[in-house]
Image (tube, rainbow, N blue to C red):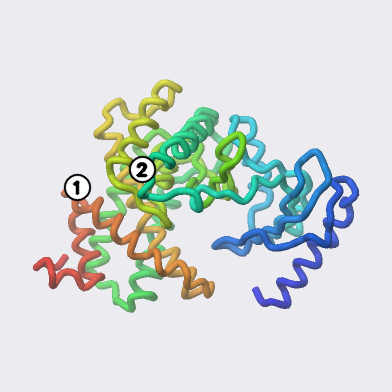
Amino acid sequence: MTDSSADIRRDALAAWLGTFAHRYGLDLQSLAPASSDASFRRYFRLASASEHGASLIAVDAPPPEKCREFAQVAQMLCEAGVHAPRVLECDLDNGFMLVTDLGTHSYIDALDSNDTVRAKPLMRDAVDALIRWQSSTREGVLPPFDEAFLRREMELMPEWYISRHLGRQIDEKMRGVLDRTYALLIASARAQPQVFMLRDFMPRNLMICEPNPGVLDFQDAVYGPISYDLASLLRDAFISWDESFELDCFAYYWEHAKKAGLPVDPDFGEFYRQIEWMGLQRHIKVLGLFARLHHRDGKPRYLTDLPRFVGYARKVCERYRPLVPFARLLDDLDDRSQQVGYTF
């Protein structure tokens, strides 16, 4: 999107807001950028004199960004007892929304991997919200996170990370390792109980507010594996936790999910394996996604987090014999095979 087109979109958004500004006491002159994300969505904050708060958020989500899905899932979250923005006004055809403001204090800004005492209550609030969301699951409401979806996500890695970013040719041997690993991860994901899944349930999309947490960026919600959102929360792009803290959070979820009647595996060891393998599927996707954000969309800041995901993936693969070939592939891609004395 060029600056000129962005200005046109902003002017159109302001004009749309002006058609009902009096209803919410909107100060259109205060319209200012609030944040942006990896998509083409943009968020603006503006002052308001209404029962909905001192400020509101105007969303510019040019089609085909998912305004309709955002509004649908926002209502579903509300009904599940999860704090999400309320959609006050929307123009689905043009991709404009006015939503309530969850504030400026995000989890990612507050969390410190070295301060688990402060992090623990925040993460437990997040886990409690996740359990409420999953407990509201109904079949046939959200798109399925099926085999084709899982495979399509993982194919971002060979296309954008291996071929485009690293400049490596994908030969028959490498393709074989990828395919066998993908088959294992897909089988594990599909064998899990399927529930409502937000897909981007991570600290940068959680806000510290009352009730806590506020949840953002949920328009891509699907019906998928029960371990996915928990893996997203603890194996994040922007913060890494000591394994003992992760285990404490996973055990807290497992115990409380069982009490809530969610169909988690009764064997915690097996449940933990499901989380690890589900997380690996996501890490593979993110390696490709972050490379694509740089090479296709001109957003290089995501490249600095690629090593974190390589580290996540390698650590998981080295723990499970069926995944060791993928660990060796990562070593080869990282020129690490010379250090450890083998090739994939």
Front in this rendered view, residue 6 or 152:
6
Percent position of residue 173, x then y: 21, 67
Question: In this rendering, is residue 86 above or below 171?
Answer: above
Q: Residue at x 52, y 34 (%)?
A: 129
Which residue is under mark 2? 189
Q: Could you tell me how many numbered marks the image carries?
A: 2
Question: In this rendering, is residue 278 above or below 195?
Answer: below
Question: In this rendering, is residue 139 above or below 245?
Answer: above
Front in this rendered view, residue 240 or 5:
240
* Residue 227 appears left or right of 44: left
Secondary structure under the numbered disc 2 in the rendered image: helix
Looking at the rendered image, the quarter that the N terminus falls into is bottom right
Front in this rendered view, residue 26 or 145:
26
Which residue is under mark 1? 320
Q: Type of residue at label 1?
A: Tyr
Q: Residue at x 40, y 33 (%)?
A: 193
* Residue 209 appears left or right of 247: right
Question: In this rendering, is residue 76 above or below 266?
Answer: below
Image quadrant assignment for residue 285 = bottom left
Task: Determine crowd level at label 2: few under 14, some 14-19, many 20+ residues with C-alpha closer than 10 A.
Answer: many
* Residue 49 appears left or right of 6: right
Looking at the rendered image, the quarter that the C terminus falls into is bottom left
Secondary structure under the numbered disc 1 in the rendered image: loop
Q: Type of residue at label 2?
A: Ala
Q: Residue at x 58, y 62 (%)?
A: 39
Task: Determine crowd level at label 1: few under 14, some 14-19, many 20+ residues with C-alpha closer than 10 A.
Answer: few
Percent position of residue 266, x then y: 30, 25
Residue 97 in view of the camera: yes
Q: Residue at x 59, y 49 (%)?
A: 219
Q: How far apart are the alpha carbons under marks 1 and 2?
A: 16 Å
Q: Residue furthest left?
A: 341
